[in-house]
Image (cartoon, rainbow, N blue to C red):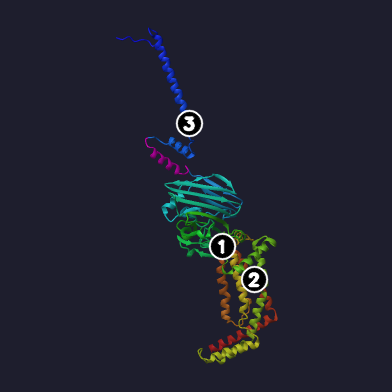
Amino acid sequence: MPEIQNPNQQGPGGGGSGMDMRTTLAFFGLFLLVFFGLQYYRSKKAPEPTPAQQSQSAQQQQSAPAASPVAATTDSSAAAASVAASGESTTTVENELYKITFTNRGAQVKSWILKKYTDDSGKPLDLVNQPAAAKFGYPLSLFAYDGGVRSRLNNGLYVASATGTLSAPNTLSFDYSAGGLTVHKSFSFDSSYVIHASVKVTDNGAPVTAMLAWPAGFGDQTTLPQYAGGMLDTSQGGKDDQVAFKKVVGGDTLRGPFDWAGVSDLYFSAIFLPDSPPDATVVSLSNTLQIPKNAKKPDPNQTEGASVLGAAIGSGAGTIDTRLFVGPKSLDVLGSVHAVSGPNLEKVVSFGWWGIISKPLFYLLRFFHDHVVSNWGWAILLLTVLLNIAMLPTRIKMMQSSLKMQRIQPEMDAIKAKYAKFKATDPRKQDMQQEIFALQKREGVNMFGGCVPMLIQWPLLFGFYRMLSNVIELRHAHWLWLPDLASPDPWHILPVFVIVSMFLTQYFTPSPGVDPAQQKMMAFTMPAVFGFMMWNFGSGLSLYWACSNFIGVAQQMIMNRTGMGREIREIAQKRAQKQRGKVINARR
């Protein structure tokens, strides 16, 4: 066997063997030096990778197992696209006027409290109608034509940019993404009743038609008459329109342009003011809610259906940018809010055709309240006295016209008797009319003289009625025993005063040309009718009506003592005696 030698052992020829090993090691070391030198040289000369290449390399390094890199990248992208909160949370935003509580479930409002107003129990007023909102949707929820999409939009747990309590001015945003549906909602707040909202909804990158909604009436609506005060308010090209609750069609799409659009009840409103009026689209919402017939003592077995109105606004682009006014229907407040296209919100207060009279009357009433008396009840009485003094000349004019007519009444009766034998279709009846007109002209009597003063009085009365029925300032305003001038008198004292005052008016006002039996019937019928009407009207209106009637009675009693009044009474007595004589003769 050949002998195996130790490489470290020097035997015969051992010096040559050691030289060969050192030569081999030197050669190997030189090779390594050259190899690493070339690598270093190439690293210096090679171009630096771009940021995109670095990012791509990093993503590849962070990907899941190398065995399936494409599948792993897809799974990672899907996880990144899903945005949702792990639980429900709330965020409260407040300023001096409101306190709004958002929930991240649907990124909608659960409570919208107006700090300067109270409900019927004296607590701060929450404008969210809780029973209706629980069924039909909360404020700032999203409306979509597809019920499934609508449910996903309003039940997802959004990620809020902040929780807890925020003070305005401030911003708040919510984000949500699941199953390809992506939603971003952001809101900004300032010191006014107006907030700004921006909403964008996409489905796998494509825009989704979703609308920002105020869907379920207002929190001050508890009785059927309060729900009946709901209406849909819109303004297009400066022309406003108010649709009563009975005429609102739920789910109806209204095409723009819109200066503003929304809903309101008698005292509060929620009005959208789109950033781009030409692109705005509005959907009217109307649902029926079963409410107790007696709100103070609710009985589940005694309910009635009430119409709950709402509105939603959007655009064809799938994005929403709009301001939203939520607050009182106060003329000063509404007048300070302007649409992008110009018009303010004053016309949300519905004075109807009588606005030209009602608004000046309100400003005069407010002047008395702010500068003369500090109570709205006394201000109403003061304005009532002023109006009756202003209308006194018309009362005197009516009395003078009535007296002139009564003076020539015997001659008119003689002319009518002369033509009584002719039929109504006989041409000679025209001669009778001409003789009567000639008589009136000769005596200076205008047959419409008694009507002209009424044409002045009645518009003033209706204007006063519309004003008292619509201004929020009378809501929860007290006077003596009345806790709320906008609600009926709880003791029904004022309606009784209205009945008594109207009876006295009929009694003291002479009516020579009216049959005594008819006059007696009117003396009892008219007070009863108006008293019944006032039974459920706001006590502020009853206060005005009763006071005005008593002032009228006092004025009439004074005028009855004048020479003109005595003459009218004498004529009335003569006509009554004559009528009785005719009745006696007829019976014989």
Please name the amino acid that badge 1 sits on: Val
Which callout, 1 or 2, points at the residue further toward the start of the chain? 1
Q: Residue at x 42, y 20 (%)?
A: 28
Q: Nearer the viewer, residue 124 or 181?
A: 181
Between marks 3 and 1, how big is the CA–CA gap?
76 Å
Q: Position of residue 437 (x, y in %)?
A: 60, 87
Please name the amino acid that badge 3 sits on: Ser
The circle drawn on residue 43 is: 3
Between marks 2 and 3, how big is the CA–CA gap?
108 Å
Q: Are marks 3 and 1 in contact (CB under 8 Å)?
A: no
Q: Quadrant of residue 517?
A: bottom right
Mark 2, residue position: 550
Mark 1, residue position: 348
Assess whether residue 351 is covered by the magenta stretch.
Answer: no
Q: Are marks 2 and 3 in contact (CB under 8 Å)?
A: no
Start-end of magenta stretch? 67-86
Q: Is residue 10 visible?
A: yes
Q: Quadrant of the N terminus?
A: top left
Please name the amino acid that badge 2 sits on: Phe
Q: Nearer the viewer, residue 356 or 127?
A: 356
Callout 2 secondary element: helix
Between marks 1 and 2, how big is the CA–CA gap?
35 Å
Callout 1 secondary element: helix
Callout 3 secondary element: helix
Q: Nearer the viewer, residue 399 or 59?
A: 59
Please state if 498 lies on the left or on the right of 75 as rendered. right
Please state if 487 lies on the left or on the right of 180 as rendered. right
Q: Residues within 10 Å of mark 3 (few under 14, many from 20)?
A: few
Q: Nearer the viewer, mark 3 or mark 1?
A: 3
Which callout, 3 or 1, points at the residue further toward the start of the chain? 3
